[in-house]
Image: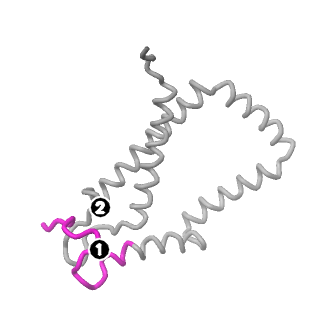
Amino acid sequence: MKQAFSWRIFISFGLCLSFIMILVSGVILYIFPGGRGNSGFIWEMAGMSKPAWQNQHIIFGFAFSLLSLFHLLLFNWKAFFSYLKTKTTEGLSRPGELLIIVMLCMFFGVGTYFKIQPFSGILEFGKSIAKSWDGNNTQEPKGMQGTGRRD
């Protein structure tokens, strides 16, 4: 006997797949060289340029956010709001943890914006990986042969 379409399973698989795509595209964008290499070709990975990977990252980020909202608000809203109420009450009686996480998130945001350490080091490390692909030679990195286009 065939069961009806399960939105719960659909959304769970969607969350998993969109998370994987966000993870993969995020790693690729972190190490992907920008623009053209020294030899004038446009970098591609898995048949997509950096702007194409950025578009994938953005769209799958939106999909993940939307699916997360459906997951929380359609299927798990009772448990979610019960948990939120309990933890909010508990959290407000222990403001130290709330204050620390808010301060840490602010530190991450401000530190990244003003490019202070360790955030600038993380950002520069990604840029150095991306720049190392260009190098001084005109040879494409191993595994990338035949993927660049010349204009």
Residue occupied by mark 1: 142
Tell whether 13 sits left or right of 77.
left
Q: Quadrant of the C terminus?
A: bottom left
Residue at the spot 28% in from the left edge and 67% down from the top edge: 35
Residue 12, x across and y down, in percent: 51, 34
- Residue 45's tag is 2
Query: Quick one: SS at disc 1?
Result: loop
Q: Quadrant of the N terminus?
A: top left
Disc 1 residue type (three-letter) = Lys
Tell whether 30 sits left or right of 92.
left
Residue at the spot 56% in from the left edge and 24% down from the top edge: 74
Quarter of the figure with residue 141: bottom left
**Count of residue discs:** 2
- Looking at the picture, does residue 129 appear above or below residue 69? below
Assign the magenta stretch its main secondary structure: loop
Residue 73, x across and y down, in percent: 59, 27
Closer to the camera, 18 or 126?
A: 18
Closer to the camera, 147 or 61?
A: 147
Residue 80, x across and y down, in percent: 67, 31
Give the residues drawn in magenta, as a range: 130-151
Mark 2 or mark 1, whichever is nearer to me: 1
Residue 108, x across and y down, in percent: 62, 61
Q: 10 Å neighbourhood of mark 2: few (<14), some, or many (≥20)?
A: some
- Looking at the picture, does residue 100 appear above or below residue 36? above
